Image (tube, rainbow, N blue to C red):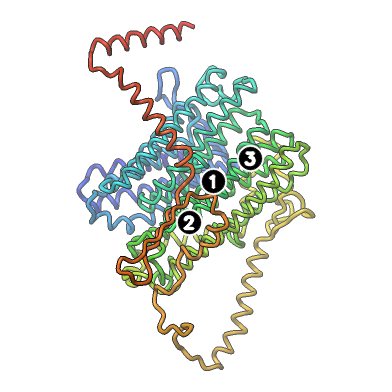
Amino acid sequence: MSYAYVAVVAALLSGLLPLLWPRNGMAVKMTAFPLLGISGLAGVISGVTALAGGKGGRDILPVGLPWLNCHLRLDALSGFFLAVVSLVALVAAIYGPAYVREYEEGPQPLLPLTLFTGLFVAGMDIVLLAADAFSFMIGWEMMSVTSYFLVAYQHQHEVNRQAAFIYLLMAQVGGLFILLGYGVLAGFGQGFDFTHMARAQLSDGWSTVAFLLAFIGFGMKAGVVPLHVWLPQAHPVAPSHVSALMSGVMLKVAVYGFIRFTYHLLGGIHWQWGALALFVGSSSAVLGVLYALMQHDLKRLLAYHSVENIGIIYIGLGLSMIFAGTGHPALAALGLVAALYHCLNHALFKSLLFFGAGVILQQSHEHDLEKMGGLIRRLPVTATCFLIGCISISALPPFNGFVSEWLTFQTALQGPVLTNNILAALIPVAAAVLALTGALAAACFVKVYGVCFLGLPRSENCASARETGQGPLLGQILLALLCLFFGVLPSWTVGRLEHVARLFFPGGMPETTAHGWLWLTPVAPHVASYGAPMVLLGVGLAWLLSWLWVHPRRRKTPVRIGSAWDCGFGPLNARMQYTATAFTMPIRRIFRPVWPIEESFQESATGSPGGRYRLKIGDWAWLKFYEPIGRLLLAGARRLAMIQGGNIRTYLAYSFFTLLVLLLVVSL
């Protein structure tokens, strides 16, 4: 575990060491990001070693509570997530120095950004290494509170303060549910370390209570519907490398906590839990992508796609729990591996997209897609890497997003082995939802890429945009290559992830990689197989043959360069192009009940043709769930205000009677 310790200590130093020279922005930057890179590199080495079946380890540090020392553990599960978190942190360290240059000249000092970024990464590492509830919650709160300050970094803007408050509120409520879940296990297990908790003998009722508490608590941090409302608020206002860390890996830390709690600590999984996870995951996937389609703010759109992809992960986990609860451990292992694979893939392509969005926003000074355009000529490297991210998140081969969604499909297609009528109806619906989600995601990123990068610039800033420093470009290129690597070599990746599945299902998966590295056969070769290297070879040959056929003819045929066809309207301009709103209008009409839509048209005051059209698309979760709860809490607060009389004797009486009640409860 020595490399894991290096990862945590280097992340802490990344945040704390620049405090020695708070006013020197260059020194802060040149201290924080290299240390963050060291933390990421050490974490990747430690995590990959544990994941590959190497030596993990346990340790007990003489810190913590008097009756509970700090227990640490590194196994294949925590090693996998540590590698994922550290990999994105490493790329963020490469991306960050050039990106934060604009913050050096802004109204906010750079020191708080680097301070809380380092502590944020350290908090995530501590969560992954913790082997007792106390250490876990310390790391969890460290992760939550530091990310709150990162969201509120540019606090001079009201929208940033509001987003940070909503995020902190949801994070603390979620943390309370997690703490209560650990309390249930500790009460039956006679201890707060995970070893005692895993031995707890719970009845079906109490185990379900603990599961629901964990499901809600971790679901709030993961961003499943309807607990997702903080996500599209917080991610757009945070700096882009922080958005990549929050969306790319912080959400996966919540998934890790859910897996650790459900598979390891609870142990005996019920199929009903899986049905709940499958339903919530399916709802999150389809609603996340539908809400993303209607967004014009680039980072808010990407945030909603995080809701979609977390839903896909929960679909895989739900299928795994269903098969585990019905006595099919091999298929349960397959579902778990599919979910883990998508955790890795989403961390890569979502971080790539947020890094690309950071370059776009920094150069165009625009968040609105409707004001972008023509960036492919001005940002060629970013445009290429962003295209790879779009293809990956749309689950198209030969990139990584296709493999994990294909594995999830193959898990769902094994539903006929179940005899339960409820599951026989639910699983095909979930598979259909997954297919619809993939199609809508592809449509969404056709919109994003077409409106943002193609056509004519819609603003002067877009027309003058140019690539930033080498760090952001290198970070994007590295993630783009990893998207291709994990898409082309799925057999190797699945073989490593199977070590995690064997922690909970010792028999492992079906013969997924029995036919060599060329073929992935999740169930059996006669059922389904996928040869990613063959797909890549086919794509390469098709491109080569096309080039060999076209290139000689281009040299022999004179080429005339002229203006684009303008349909007889005269010279084209930016206002004649398709907009993001127009592109998604048919989908908006088809799925209209999904969104609360407000439309208005105001005619021109001068009486000339035309006017102003206004379209506002809301979120039903706010209107139907959170706003009623807010009104109820405010009404209750007004009623309780009567006890706030300002009399010190009254307050002492409240304290005295509260103490009596607590003593009575303890005596029972």
Quarter assignment of residue 120: top left
Q: CA distance from mark 2 to mark 3?
A: 28 Å
Quarter assignment of residue 545: bottom right
Label 3: few (<14), some (14–19) or many (≥20) C-alpha neighbours in 10 Å:
many
Inspect the image, locate mark 1, and give the three-letter code of the amino acid beneath it. Ile
Q: Position of residue 302 (x, y in %)?
A: 46, 54
Q: Position of residue 136 (x, y in %)?
A: 46, 31
Q: Which residue is pictured at 39% across the width and 35% down the height?
A: 169
Q: CA distance from mark 1 to mark 3?
A: 12 Å
Of the numbered discs in the image, which one, if any, rests on residue 294?
Answer: 2
Judge from the rendering whether residue 175 lies leftward or rightward of residue 117; answer left or right: right
Check if mark 1's residue and mark 3's residue have beta carbons within 8 Å.
Answer: no
Q: Which residue is pictured at 48% across the width and 50% down the height?
A: 304
Dot 3 corresponds to which residue? 318
Inspect the image, locate mark 2, and give the three-letter code of the amino acid beneath it. Met
Vertical relation: 641 (above or below) 141: above
Dot 1 corresponds to which residue? 310
Q: Position of residue 182 (x, y in %)?
A: 51, 25
Looking at marks 2 and 3 on the same chain, the residue that comes earlier in the sequence is marked by 2
Q: Secondary structure at mark 2?
A: loop
Vertical relation: 312 (above or below) 648: below
Q: Secondary structure at mark 3?
A: helix
